[in-house]
Structures are given as structure tokens and as C-alpha cells.
Image (cartoon, rainbow, N blue to C red):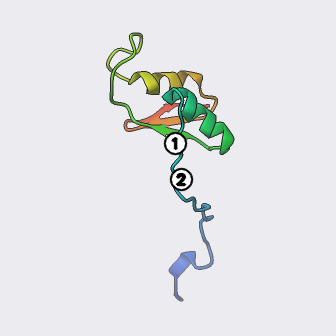
């Protein structure tokens, strides 16, 4: 077989590269994350899953993560995997 074997000429589509950006805002964390996702037309939101627990969420999700998961219209992922699908 030639170079590349049986899969020569078959390429997976490349994902566009993105550059991390730092943005400082004076707002509640969940509000800031949701607004930034909208402003940047994010495909998904990734958040941490540790921290002070919201009363309803118990100790599974932090209060910011809990708010983002339940208010976002986008998929939300975290340290434990996908938390919410759209």
C-alpha cells in the first residue's frame, strides 16, 4: 500500500482553533458566564463542579455551576462530563 495505507486521502474535518481570552467583569459569576457565552456565540460552556453548594443542588454542583446548568440554552460540561444538553 502507498503512503497512508487504506485511509490515504481521507481526512477528518479540522476544528477551528480558538485563542483563550481573559475578560474581567464586575457581575455575578453565573450572569457573567451566560452573557459571555451569548456574546461570543459559544458552542458550549465548561464550568468547574466544586465549591459551595446551592441549597437545592446539595453537594453535587457548586451554586454557580447549578445556575449555569439550569439557565443556559447551550450544552454545559464540567469536570464530571456533560452536565446538560441543549
The percent position of residue 20, horizontal first and vertical second, equals: 51, 55
- Which residue does the image show at 65% across and 45% down from the upper left? 40
- Which residue does the image show at 60% across and 28% down from the upper left? 72
The quadrant in which residue 14 appears is bottom right
Instruction: Report helix, strand or loop for mark 2.
Output: loop
The residue tagged 2 is 21
Q: Is residue 37 above or below residue 8?
A: above
The residue tagged 1 is 24
Q: In this rendered view, identify the residue nearer to me: 52 or 79.
A: 52
Q: In this rendered view, identify the residue nearer to me: 74 or 5.
A: 74
Q: In this rendered view, identify the residue nearer to me: 28 or 75.
A: 28
The quadrant in which residue 32 appears is top right
- The answer to whether one can see residue 85 in this image is no
- The answer to whether one can see residue 36 in this image is yes
Report how far apart the C-alphas of labels 2 and 1 lie in the structure.
Answer: 10 Å
The percent position of residue 85, horizontal first and vertical second, equals: 57, 31
Instruction: Report helix, strand or loop for mark 1.
Output: loop
- Callouts 2 and 1 close, C-beta under 8 Å: no
Q: Is residue 45 rendered to the left or right of residue 16? A: left
- Which residue does the image show at 45% across and 25% down from the upper left? 64
Q: Is residue 41 above or below residue 2?
A: above
Label 1 crowding class (10 Å Cα cut-off): few <14, some 14-19, many 20+? few
* Front of the two marks 2 and 1: 1
Q: Is residue 52 above or below residue 37?
A: above
Residue furthest bottom as drawn? 2
The percent position of residue 30, horizontal first and vertical second, equals: 52, 27
Residue furthest top as drawn? 55
How many numbered badges does the structure rendering display?
Answer: 2
- Which residue does the image show at 64% across and 29% down from the upper left? 73
Q: Is residue 58 above or below residue 50?
A: above
- Quadrant containing the C terminus in the rendered view: top right
Amino acid at each position: 500500500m502507498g503512503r497512508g495505507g487504506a485511509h490515504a486521502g481521507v481526512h477528518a474535518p479540522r476544528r477551528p482553533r480558538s485563542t483563550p481570552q481573559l475578560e474581567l467583569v464586575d457581575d455575578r459569576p453565573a450572569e457573567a458566564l451566560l452573557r459571555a457565552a451569548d456574546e461570543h456565540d459559544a458552542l458550549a460552556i465548561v464550568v468547574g463542579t466544586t465549591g459551595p453548594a446551592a441549597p437545592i443542588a446539595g453537594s453535587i454542583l457548586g451554586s454557580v455551576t447549578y445556575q449555569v446548568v439550569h439557565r443556559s440554552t447551550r450544552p454545559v460540561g464540567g469536570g464530571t462530563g456533560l452536565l446538560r444538553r441543549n
